[in-house]
Amino acid sequence: MNRDQAMILALTALWTLVVGAIGALVLWQFRRRSLRVTIIVVALAPLAAALAAVGQSVRAMFISTHDSLVVLWTLAFSGLLGLAMAVVLAHWISTGSRDVGRRLRHLGTSYEAVGVAANGNVPAELAELTHELESTRARLAASRERERALESSRRELVAFMSHDLRTPLAGLRALSEGLEDGVIEDVPGALKQMQTTVDRMTGLVDDLFELSRLSTAPPPRRRTAVSLRELAEDVVGETSEHARVNGVTVAVSAPDDDDTLAVHGDGDELTRAVTNLVGNAIRHTAPGGTVKVSVDREADGRVRLAVTDGCGGISDDDLERVFDIGWRGDEQRTPAMAGSSSGGGLGLAIAKGVVESHEGTIGVTNVPGGCEFSIDLP
């Protein structure tokens, strides 16, 4: 490298540093301004450094005036191109940033969709951030709907439980006053009725306690291998008298092989869940109908227990609410879907809590003439 080339290199480096320092100061002054201004300053700084270096080289007579004009015109048009591209890029980024800010402002105050961005030419990073914000908004909206549904079910539960407790309490008070006044002649019958009423109220309290225990996620009880085949047969045997009184037939269906269809769980909890489903099916099946309890193993190794009744089916709008706490369905089905001997609307909610605590799933679908409640357990 000769002396002239070294001088040109030194002058170019010097002016680049000077213009870079000035550009840094300008950026610092505009750091709180629009991003568009910052991008334009960044685009113009290299052009200014090049122009200053060429001008110094002309004054030092390292290049001729003719050659300098060619270089300057080239830099001018290149600068215009860079400036135009910087303005377009700044517009895209500013548009995307405003859209992100708009979505952030609505994130905690509105759960409705904000809408698409005004300009779809935003950079990929901003587009991804916008997508994440929209996904977050959708999740918050879903969570809010679940919270509303839970609050509604809680209010329904309080209303139903108040009614279910007020009625037997009024009956107990009437019986006790009648016994006290001596106006009841059949004293043993009255005492038996009082005992039945107390048992029904005890069932309500037990249901509430069990639901509370499942909702607070207690430490798991001791779990062992439980045969769902034997469990289903035991539940059908225990509910046979209830079915006979209602004029309903209960049948068990299981594979012919020697598979016990065992799962790892708490036998008492699973028995209560299946008993709730079978009792619910018996109550909602018309006299002369059949409740079918089937147990089988799925292709993936999971064990499925299904209870099919003759209730006539459930409306599509109500299928999603069947397992809500305190829900009973329409007036014609009250205590429809209660699934509890107490009629408190807790049986199916308890069954769902038991199944989910065993890492299983529970669902309901309509079938010809009725509906099918299914439990899938690992």
Image (cartoon, rainbow, N blue to C red):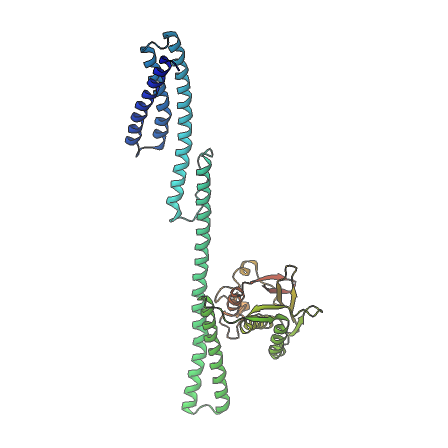
- Specify whether residue 186 is in view: no
> What x and y, as percent, mark residue 317?
54, 58
Q: Quadrant of the N terminus?
A: top left
> What x and y, as percent, mark residue 47?
37, 21
| Residue sitting nearer the eye, 299 or 157 | 299
Does 70 sit above or below residue 297? above
The image quadrant of residue 25 is: top left
Does 310 sit above or below residue 244? above
Q: Quadrant of the C terminus?
A: bottom right
How many numbered discs? 0
The image quadrant of residue 289 is: bottom right
The image quadrant of residue 256 is: bottom right
Please give the name of the residue rendered at 46% of the width and 53% of the height, measured from the top-left corner: 142
Please give the name of the residue rendered at 44% of the width and 41% of the height, measured from the top-left corner: 130
- Specify whether residue 179 is in view: yes
> What x and y, as percent, mark residue 143?
45, 55
Does 253 sit above or below residue 44? below
| Residue sitting nearer the eye, 220 or 212 | 220
Left or right, 27 with reference to 192: left
| Residue sitting nearer the eye, 198 or 103 | 103
Please give the name of the residue rendered at 47% of the width and 81% of the height, measured from the top-left corner: 198
> What x and y, as percent, mark residue 27?
31, 30
Looking at the image, which residue sits at the far right? 256
